[in-house]
Image (tube, rainbow, N blue to C red):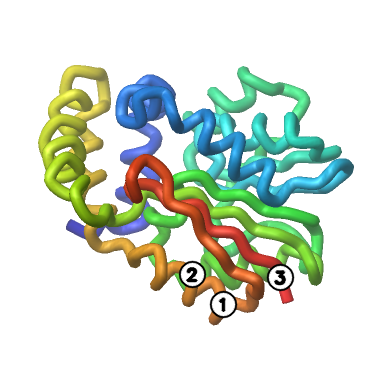
Amino acid sequence: MTLAPEAVRTMFDRIAPVYDAMNRVMTMGLDLRWRKLAARAVVREGDRVLDAACGTGDLALADRRAGAARVTGLDFSEPMLARARRKAPDLEWVRGDMLALPFADATFDAATVGFGVRNVADLPLALRELRRVLRAGGRVAILEITQPRGLLRPFYSLWFDRLVPLLGRLLPGGDAYTYLPASVKRFPGAEELAESLRESGFGDVTFRLFAGSIVALHTGVAE
């Protein structure tokens, strides 16, 4: 199941009220720790940081706690941004598209994306846009659900293919979580995403796997 960009935006508009609750449920509360690790991996004291596909702002807040002097959160869903603004009205929140970032070249020292690149219509373009707005030597961190390996595959299938969509249906607007399993299955694996980062102008690309390989944190340096 592939959704058009406008359909994806509409879906995220609908799930904004339950987004934080579903993140906590789906990850058993671990997503906040993963966001903290993503921020710490690339943010340095005094950095200007872009958090793209920021959703309700949890990773942007982690970026600030990691030492960023200025944090800009960008998302294409206004209801998501409205919730982010309530959490941190002092940060900069911008409505925009990852495929055409509304920033000049070399604007940021670091960029983070938490569970967002999986939903873009053109992944290579999104990665090139992240590279474009980073200064040379700037750092990127991408946190994303990935395809599990080994013994956890059956558990993953049960959790994401069956239980998460069922839980989503119990919450207003949460029926959109039926889209989640399909979006993960069509997304590149960890090694393929690392190669895409290299092809998009990033060097020193590495990744770490969490939760028994269900989640990957990729990092790279703009060349």
Q: Distance from label 2 to label 1 (Cα)?
A: 6 Å
Q: Tell me: residue 4, above or below residue 223.
A: above
Which of marks 3 and 2 precedes in the sequence? 2
Q: Would you say residue 17 is visible in this rendering? A: no
Q: Tell me: residue 103, above or below residue 24.
A: below
Which residue was labeled with disc 2? 194
Report the amino acid beneath label 3. Answer: Ala
Where disc 1 sits, the SS reads: helix
Report the amino acid beneath label 2. Answer: Ala
Q: Position of residue 100 (x, y in %)?
A: 59, 63
Residue 164 vs residue 107, the one in the foreground: 164
Q: Tell me: residue 149, above or below residue 32.
A: below
Q: Position of residue 22 (x, y in %)?
A: 34, 25
Where disc 2 sits, the SS reads: helix
The answer to whether residue 211 is left or right of residue 135 is left
Q: Position of residue 216 (x, y in %)?
A: 44, 52
Q: Residue at x 18, y 35 (%)?
A: 159
Q: Are marks 2 and 1 in contact (CB under 8 Å)?
A: yes
Q: Residues within 10 Å of mark 1 (few under 14, many from 20)?
A: some
Which of marks 1 and 3 precedes in the sequence? 1
Q: Residue at x 41, y 70 (%)?
A: 191
Where disc 3 sits, the SS reads: strand
Which residue was labeled with disc 3? 222
Q: Residue at x 59, y 27 (%)?
A: 84
Q: Distance from label 3 to label 1 (Cα)?
A: 9 Å
Residue 173 vs residue 152, the one in the foreground: 152
The answer to whether residue 163 is left or right of residue 34 is left
Q: Residue at x 86, y 42 (%)?
A: 45
Q: Are marks 2 and 3 in contact (CB under 8 Å)?
A: no
Q: Which mark is residue 198?
A: 1
Q: Position of residue 40 (x, y in %)?
A: 68, 42
